[in-house]
Image: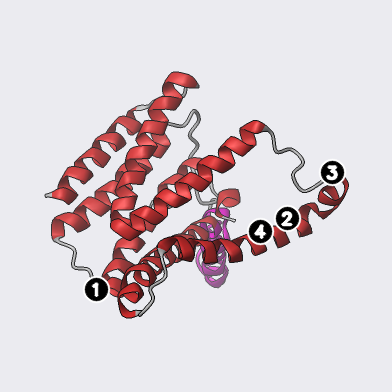
Amino acid sequence: LAATHLDPAAFQLLYQMKLLWTAFFSVVLLGRRLKSNQLSAVGLLALGLGLASQGSSSAVTSTKLPPVNLSPPGKGDKIVTTTFLHQLFFSDFATGFFAVFFACMLSGFSSVYFERVVKTKRKQQKYPISVWARNAQLATFSSAIATFGALVKDGHNIRTRGFLHGFTPLVWTVVALQAGGGMCTAAVIAYADNLLKGFATGVSMLFCSLASYFWFDTIIAIPFVFGATAVIAAIFLYSC
């Protein structure tokens, strides 16, 4: 929903709010105390990633609210207010913004709550469940939901061509990379925390952008330079 109502630059910039929500829920759910420099580092990281995501794209477009119909004062005042509020809350940008807002909030809550389940309840249980078992449990539910969605959307193609139609060696490589990334994420949650995962993700994003510059001739603009500088500064600020 958010991706269809926002241009890629605005979506990437707004989606960095998940780092702020992750820090918020880390304080609320885990009782973690963050110093002022750590809070500043999280905000700087979100800003840096937003700038870097815009500066590494080949084409950046601006997202603007539709023009407001201003009628002369008098009897039309109520109509002007209704039109402005309608354009403000029901425009494509507003729909995309609220979708990103709630997506970031749910993403931050789920990641921190999973960390709480892994770290807190393991100490309270007589026979603690490992992180890998938790991942298997989550994968069971997500696989069932994904299978249902695939059958609803592409049920005819699956019945006629098979469930694994189109899985080329390149696709299997991507699947293996995604699975390995999930295992690494589980290890990060077990031995570190979600905030450090956010910083690691920021660094990996910079490396991916630089690799795209050398391999796919991606244009690196000035915002990417400022964003990369902000990400590096945020890492040092968080570790102080």
Mark 4–mark 2 contact, CB under 8 Å? yes
Alpha-carbon span between mark 3 and mark 4 = 18 Å
Is residue 84 among what the camera can see?
Answer: no
Q: Please tell me how many numbered marks the rendered image carries.
A: 4
Alpha-carbon span between mark 4 and mark 2 = 6 Å
Position of 54 compared to 192: left or right?
Answer: right
Mark 1–mark 2 contact, CB under 8 Å? no
Mark 3–mark 4 contact, CB under 8 Å? no
- The residue indicated by pointer 4 is 146
Q: Is residue 58 above or below residue 45?
A: above
- The residue indicated by pointer 1 is 31
Task: Name the spot of residue 114 as percent of width and height, x first.
Answer: 41, 67
Give the mark nearest the N terminus, 4 or 1.
1
Label 3 Cα neighbours within 10 Å, binned few <14 / some 14-19 / many ≥20: few
Query: For residue 122, what is the image quadrant?
Result: bottom left
| Magenta stretch bounds | 68-95
Which residue is rendered at x = 32% and y = 80% of the image? Answer: 124
Position of 198 compared to 183: left or right?
Answer: left
- Which one is nearer the viewer's eye here, 198 or 189? 189
- The residue indicated by pointer 3 is 161
* Numbered disc 1: secondary structure: loop
* Quarter of the N terminus within the rendering: bottom right
* Numbered disc 3: secondary structure: helix
- Mark linked to residue 150: 2
The amino acid at mark 3 is Arg
Which residue is rendered at x = 32% and y = 69% of the image? Answer: 119
Camera-nearest label, 3 or 1: 3
